[in-house]
Every structure is written in structure tokens, then in C-alpha cells.
Image (cartoon, helix red, strand yellow):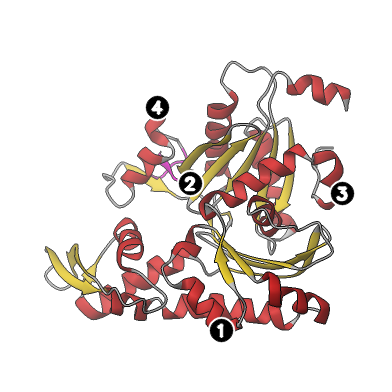
Amino acid sequence: MLLDRFMGLFSVDMGIDLGTCNTLVAVRGQGIVLNEPSVVAVRKGTNQVLKGGQAVGWMAKEMLGRTPGSISAIRPLKDGVISDFEITEKMLGYFIRKVNGRGKIVGPRVVISVPSGITAVEKRAVFDSAERAGARRTYLVEEPIAAAIGAGLPFADPTASMIVDIGGGTTEVAILSLGDIAECESVRVAGDDMDEAIMNHLKRTYNLMIGEQTAERIKIEAGSAFNLGDEVEMEVRGRDMISGLPRRTLISSGEIREALQEPVNAIVDAITRTLERAAPELAADLVENGITMAGGGSLLKGLTNVIEKATGLPTRLADDPLTCVARGTAIYLEHIEEWKLTLDSDMHV
């Protein structure tokens, strides 16, 4: 223990929200120090990462859908879990070195958030990636717990708190009490599925092919889950599926709302199923405490209105929902000694 503290003087311990879309890193006393897309640029047909800082993060994301034949821009996580072990390891290593500093001789202690529904094999993949990326000691914490801590919920009290964390690949729904999860459900429907629904709508309705980044921009600017009365129109550019030529078209926020119904309904269904399984006393607490929303997907306009209407419970957005999980991992790291019994502690032999 004393040795661990001593070694901590030579490294920067960090909490990591390893997300399908973005990776965020938080450090005690400094808050969020890194927020970059979970994208890596590699040479086509290999796992050889391009040289230089443009290979990972923001610069790599700009390449999505725009790469020449010799380069691939890869997202190594899918549905909240690692789909490409080697690329994830290289990406994590880049982010850890960027925060810890290349001159540090001791690796950091790292807390990484993971979806509550992942398997032991998927957890092992996260551990191994962090270890190979240079972490001295690795801990995993379930995303709903990290999100609840980051949102400032009284998750350790003998009263129910409910968190809904909508990321890029998964939606985590959990009821927490006494420092642990009482009921939870993890569904692999989230922000990426909203983008895909928009892409499919434009294909079906306008014979227009658009990329992931355009779909995300439409979701942010014109997307909504509930009619808030301020309908907008938006110009969209892409490739015509019949002629093969570039063209533009106008779309309305109403049709995008219709296109998003399927993923939104899947998220609402997961919330109602979790509530139906809650013990009576926990359900009674939630009548007053309500539901707290976190994650980038929760920023979809009108989503809190839809959930409030479906459940009858007060629903609110957490402060800065995008960074909730990352901030929660950093706070968990501060209290590691008292809370690590509820963690999946490091698997180093």
C-alpha cells in the first residue's frame, strides 16, 4: 500500500471512460484532461498505426469516410466493447502516454468504466489492453455506478437513485442503492443506432447516401424525440444512389423525429422493464427522486419529455452529461480503498 502511494508520486493516476464514440480521461484535481474520438488511422490491410499525432483521436475522426485507398480509419470499439484488441491497445497507450507524460518511468493506476452487461471475456480484454498500454494497476467500474457518482447522485445512501447513461454503443439503465446496483439493464442501442436510423431514412426516402459524421450532425441540429414546437429544415449533402453523383436535399426535423422512433422506443422500453423489476420500496423512492440522464445520447432534444411521459417520473439531465462517467471514474479512484470491494479489482497475477 505504502509502495503504491510512493509509486503514485511518479505517475498521473487517471479515470477513463472508454467509449464507443469518444474516450475521456479525468485526473483528480484537474477534471477532464482529454476528450477525443475513439478512432485510429491505420494502413489498409494491416494494424500498422500511421505515424504522428494525426493517427489517433480528432485527426483520425476527420478521416472517417474520407480516406484514400491506402488508409483506413477504424473505430476499435463496438457496442461498448472491444472489437479490435490490438488497435484498442495502441489507442489506449497513446491516450495514457499523452496524459501521464512520456518521461514518466512508472505507469499510472487506471480506473476504466465498462458496460454492466459485458462478459468476463470482454472484461479480460479491457484489462489486458490497459496493462499492455502501460497501466501499473487497472480497476474496472460499471458505467452506471461511474455515471451516478459523476452526476452527484447519493448512490451510497439507503435510498433509490436511477441513472440512464446513453453512450455511443450502449444504454445503461440502473437503479442504485447502498453503493451498488439493485436492478440494471444494458442494451446495445444508443447514439450510433440513432445515426444509423437517420442514414437509413435518407437512403429509403431520398435515395441519398450520407456518412456517419453527416448523420451525427443531423441528429444534433435537427434531431428530436418529442415535438417541441420549433420545427426546422436542414440542407443535407451526399451521394445519389441511382446516378452516383453528389447532390443535396432538404429535410425537416419532423421526419428525423419519425426516423428516430425505433431506437428511442428501445431505450424507453429498457427503462420501463427495469422499473417493473424494482422492489416496492425502491420504486417508492423513485417517485420523488426521479430519473437522471447522462451520456451524449441523452442530449437528444425532447428525450427527457418522452421518458417522463412514459414512466410518470420526474426526469432531468445531469450537469454536463457528456463527462459524467469520466468524472465518476476519477472520483472512484480517489476513494479506491473504501470502495474497491465493489470494483472488479485488478486481475494481475
If you read the primary sequence from the N terminus, does the residue marked by circle 1 or circle 4 appear first?
4
Q: Which residue is mark 2?
A: 38
Point 55% across, 54% down: residue: 319
Q: Main secondary structure of the magenta part?
A: loop
Q: Position of residue 220 (x, y in %)?
A: 35, 61
Tell me which corner region of the image, top left, top right, bottom left or bottom right, holds residue 26: top right
* Residue type pointed to by label 2: Ser
If you read the primary sequence from the N terminus, does the residue marked by circle 4 or circle 2 appear first?
2
Tell me which corner region of the image, top left, top right, bottom left or bottom right, holds residue 112: top right
* Residue type pointed to by label 4: Gly
- Secondary structure category for the residue under label 2: loop
Numbered disc total: 4
Q: Are marks 1 and 2 in contact (CB under 8 Å)?
A: no
Left or right position of 312 against 207: right
Magenta range: 38-47
Whole-number angstrom distance, CA of label 2 to CA of label 3: 30 Å
Q: Does 109 appear above or below 178?
A: above
Whole-number angstrom distance, CA of label 1 to CA of label 3: 36 Å
Please name whichever residue, 229 or 42, is drawn nearer the observer in this view of the structure: 229
Whole-number angstrom distance, CA of label 3 to CA of label 4: 40 Å
Point 43% across, 48% down: residue: 74
Q: Nearer the viewer, mark 1 or mark 3?
A: 1
Q: Position of residue 22 (x, y in %)?
A: 49, 48
Point 67% across, 81% down: residue: 273
Q: Which residue is mark 1?
A: 310
Q: Position of residue 68 (x, y in %)?
A: 26, 44
Whole-number angstrom distance, CA of label 1 to CA of label 4: 49 Å
If you read the primary sequence from the N terminus, does the residue marked by circle 1 or circle 3 appear first?
1
Left or right position of 294 against 244: right
Whole-number angstrom distance, CA of label 4 to CA of label 2: 16 Å
